[in-house]
Image: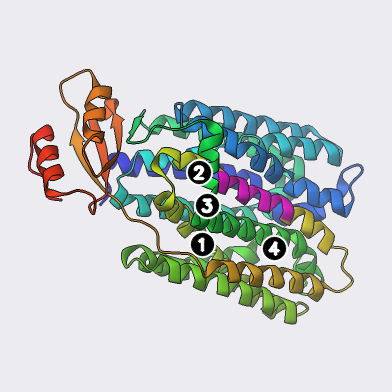
Amino acid sequence: MMNSLERRSTFALSSIFALRMLGLFMIIPVFAVAGQQYTGATPALIGLAVGIYGLSQACLQIPFSLWADRFSRKPLIIIGLALFAIGGAIAALSTSIYGVILGRAIAGSGAVSAVVMALLSDVTREEQRSKAMAFMGMSIGLSFMLAFSLGPWVTTKVGISGLFWVTTIMGMLAMLMLLLVPKVSRHYRVAPQGYLTQLKQVLAMGDLNRLHVSIFMLHLLLTAMFVFIPSQLIEYADIPLAKQGWVYLPLLLISLLFAFPSIILAEKYRKMRGIFITAVIAIVFGLAIMAFGDQSKYVLLLGLGLFFIAFNVMEALLPSWLSKSAPIQSKSTAMGINSSSQFLGAFCGGVLGGQLLGFAQTSWGWGLLTLLAVIWLGLTFSLKQPRYLSSIVVSLPETKKLDEWASILLAIHGIEEVVVMPEKQVAYLKLDKQQLNESSRQELSQLLGQELAI
């Protein structure tokens, strides 16, 4: 069961993530049509405007995450949210497609997704980490659901420029949510290395790279699909753009009903790998269904529903899996590479979606996306189950030399990380039970002044 600190922090950080995603993604289901009003707009530039934020995110996630492994994470998040809000304002004031592209690029340069996830892993115990990450993943899925549903509706009310102003407001609201998260100091068994050495170490881990490819492919397919499909829903399903949100909303709600049991099964019974591969298979089938029945209203909706089920499952599983597999001292760096892959995928998906709009037959576009998903599926079979750590919560000692106290704890074999929260007078000890022998248990019990049931 999460304690009050974990619940509050999880809610706040998930809300920050969701508000950013909502602001960035409301444009996706409407811009392929609404973006044609801008001066200089072409299909290729419209696709670029949709996906450009992903390119700037991909370029800056790793620098932000490397800094976050050395410095306080909260100021970096504030900087990123400020850039997000400024970029939305620039896009809202623009009358040409190039101004929108610039604004989206600046909004994307607030590349703090990995920093937010790393801060969440700091303030949650290992046993509750999966719940927290799953909650964040589901909040991301919910933000996509709301984005695809609200985007068309908001655009009919305030126009496309008003939609960009909404993203600026969301950025400012996200800054306020950060006030709910406590200040933390982190202590590791292994200190962070030089920037380049640390980056190379993380990039050399095969399973992490497969997770990076997975998030890249997931968001490439998602973004390409939502640049590609609005015009098909208008032509083949006779659903105008303003009403397409009411198509996405029930499909995504149904997908959540399937996603929740899948996430519980993956986390509680440690079936993460099996559920993950099953979700990729569902994405392949969803895209294949749309490739063979792209001109049928009900076949399109069936394929979309299957895609959304798998998407929501993977959005919940990927952050949790990554937090388990990444080296503790390089956690933010690993998450930064993953987030770079995610947003690079979104950029490539936006560009690809713009190209798909020019295909003579829509089935060719769905066929290409299906082929990419099949290639991705082949790469996932070599994934291994993640490592599981445990956590205990302890009260801080009377001493003011907390750094020394943390160093003594880290000298005990089996203790991997100590996260100190002075404001709450508690610390989380994150440990590997398999490495904690009887001598280590006794030493830890004496140091903390209590018998430990671990």
Earlier residue among tags 4 and 3: 3
Earlier residue among tags 2 and 4: 2
Secondary structure that dominates the magenta span: helix
* Mark 4 crowd level (few <14, some 14–19, many ≥20, 10 Å Cα): many
Mark 1 and mark 2: span between their CA atoms?
A: 25 Å
Q: Which residues are drawn in magenta?
A: 337-348
* Mark 3 crowd level (few <14, some 14–19, many ≥20, 10 Å Cα): many
Residue topped by disc 2: 201
Q: How is the image coloured?
A: rainbow
Disc 3 residue type? Ile
Nearest to the eye among marks 1 and 3: give it. 1
Disc 1 residue type? Met
For the point 39% across and 69% down, the residue is: 261
Residue topped by disc 3: 140
| SS of the residue under disc 2 | helix
419 sits left or right of 210 in the view: left
Query: Residue 314, labelled with which disc?
Result: 1
For the point 51% across and 70% down, the residue is: 277
Disc 2 residue type? Gln
For the point 34% across and 66% down, the residue is: 270
Residue 317: % across, % down: 46, 59
208 or 118, which lies in front?
208
Query: Residue 244, labelled with which disc?
Result: 4
Earlier residue among tags 3 and 2: 3
Residue 325: % across, % down: 42, 52
